[in-house]
Amino acid sequence: MAAPGGVLNCEDFSMFQEVIKGMRTIDDRIVHSLNTTVPTVSFSGKVDATQTCKELYESLMEAHLSRDKAIKSCITETSAVVGQLREKRAKDSDNLSIIKQLRKEQTKLKIMQSELNVEEVVNDRSLKVFNERCRIHYTPPKIK
């Protein structure tokens, strides 16, 4: 699940948020996916619940990893911009446009870093719901 077009625009924060929101679709619809694909006890013979849960788990992990990678790459990119602006400010400490740009980039960086916390909550919620429905059908491998 990559960003649309394969590239995440880290410069435009509102676009960054939209792309991350779109990438969270699988987590937003986890309950629906489980309800429609994992059978209840009365229908357990008609569907391979083990395979279904395994595929859903793999999709979740792929989505979580791609979002984590995307967020961290934007944090790295924005951190570099902040570093460059700090160097410029050190050379020209009276330039208000550099100071304003630096503050703007620092704010964007803090918000992107907070997205990692949001990501952790989203991932935990999805895995909790997954485990509630799939624990008897599929046990995911332990993550080291």
Image (spheres, rainbow, N blue to C red):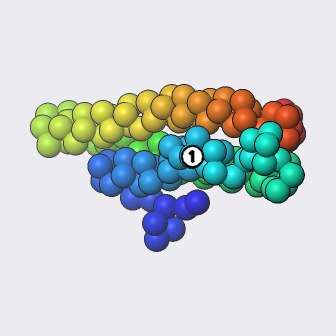
Q: Quadrant of the C terminus?
A: top right
Residue 10 in view here: no
Residue 32 at what x, y percent from top left? 57, 46
Outermost residue, bottom direction?
Answer: 5
Per the image, the residue denoted by label 1 is: 32
Q: Residue at x 46, y 66 (%)?
A: 4
79 left or right of 46 in image:
left
Residue 130 in view here: yes
Quarter residue 93 falls in: top left
Q: Residue at x 58, y 60 (%)?
A: 1
Which of the two residues, 132 or 116, is positioned nearer the viewer here?
132
Quarter residue 83 falls in: top left
73 left or right of 60 in image:
left
71 left or right of 35 in image:
left
Quarter residue 130 falls in: top right
Residue 38 at what x, y percent from top left? 73, 47
Residue 137 at what x, y percent from top left? 85, 41
Q: In this picture, is 60 found above or below 130?
A: below
How packed mark 1 is, by other alpha carbons closer than 10 Å (few <14, some 14-19, many 20 or more), is few
Q: Residue at x 85, y 41 (%)?
A: 138
| Kind of residue indicated by mark 1 | His
Q: In this picture, is 129 found above or below 85?
A: above
Q: Secondary structure at mark 1?
A: helix
Q: Residue at x 58, y 41 (%)?
A: 31
Outermost residue, front direction?
Answer: 42
Tell me how many marks there are: 1
Residue 28 at what x, y percent from top left? 50, 43
Which of the two residues, 128 or 115, is positioned nearer the viewer here?
128
